[in-house]
Image (spheres, rainbow, N blue to C red):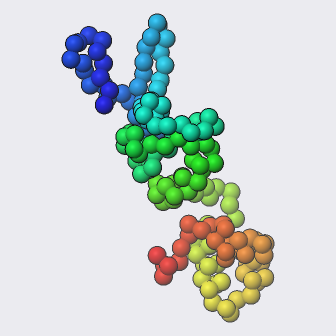
Amino acid sequence: RIKSFQNTQEGVLIHGSLIQGYQSLNVRFQNKSVNHYIHKLVAKHFCPQNNPKDTFVIHLDFNKQDNRADNLQWADRSKVTEHNKKNPSVINRLIPIRTKNYKLTEGKVMLIKQMLKSDKSRLKMIAKQFGITHTQLNRIRSGENWKQVKLLDEV
């Protein structure tokens, strides 16, 4: 919690604002306004920074609103990247689907996946039928491309 003692003796609780889910505080001093992230302020004053290269602060429980000192840790860019790979909101985020100017639609990809599932169709024939390359077909099969498209029995 942050209190302002500017106009009162007992202080007024400041809520600040949110920037991309992180609580922030705008501080004015000598006609200059500076924005501070609350988790960075808490980490700066209450969490040990073992390495000077650790310039980022991560939330251990992935909750951007939980700014307790025991939930914060200093990290470098590689640690942040590794930490975010485990973040449920990053893992489960919706990948925007851009289908303008694509040869394939989601419906066509579902058909391709069904044809790939049955061993009756040859890859070369499927590729020719849909006007795509054999490589593209392999990428669809492996899930590298169009992984968000699932067959009805996979959902």
| Quarter of the view holding residue 112 | bottom right
Q: Residue at x 43, y 14 (%)?
A: 28
- Asked whether 70 or 22 is in front, the reply is 70
| Quarter of the view holding residue 133 | bottom right
Considering every residue shown, the one lying at the far top of the view is 30
Q: Is residue 75 left or right of residue 26?
A: right
Residue 80 image point, x, y percent: 57, 47
**Taking the image as drawn, is residue 56 in sight?**
no
Q: Residue at x 60, y 82 (%)?
A: 114
Residue 40 image point, x, y percent: 47, 33
Q: Is residue 111 left or right of residue 129?
A: left
Q: Does residue 113 sit above or below 88 in this rendering?
A: below
Considering every residue shown, the one lying at the far bottom of the view is 120
**Taking the image as drawn, is residue 40 in sight?**
yes
Residue 130 image point, x, y percent: 71, 74
- Asked whether 67 or 99 is in front, the reply is 67
Q: Residue at x 53, y 77 (%)?
A: 151
Q: Is residue 1 left or right of residue 53?
A: left
Residue 134 image point, x, y percent: 78, 75
Query: In the picture, which quadrant includes the N terminus?
Result: top left
Q: Residue at x 68, y 93 (%)?
A: 120
- Asked whether 115 or 150 is in front, the reply is 150
- Asked whether 26 or 73 is in front, the reply is 73
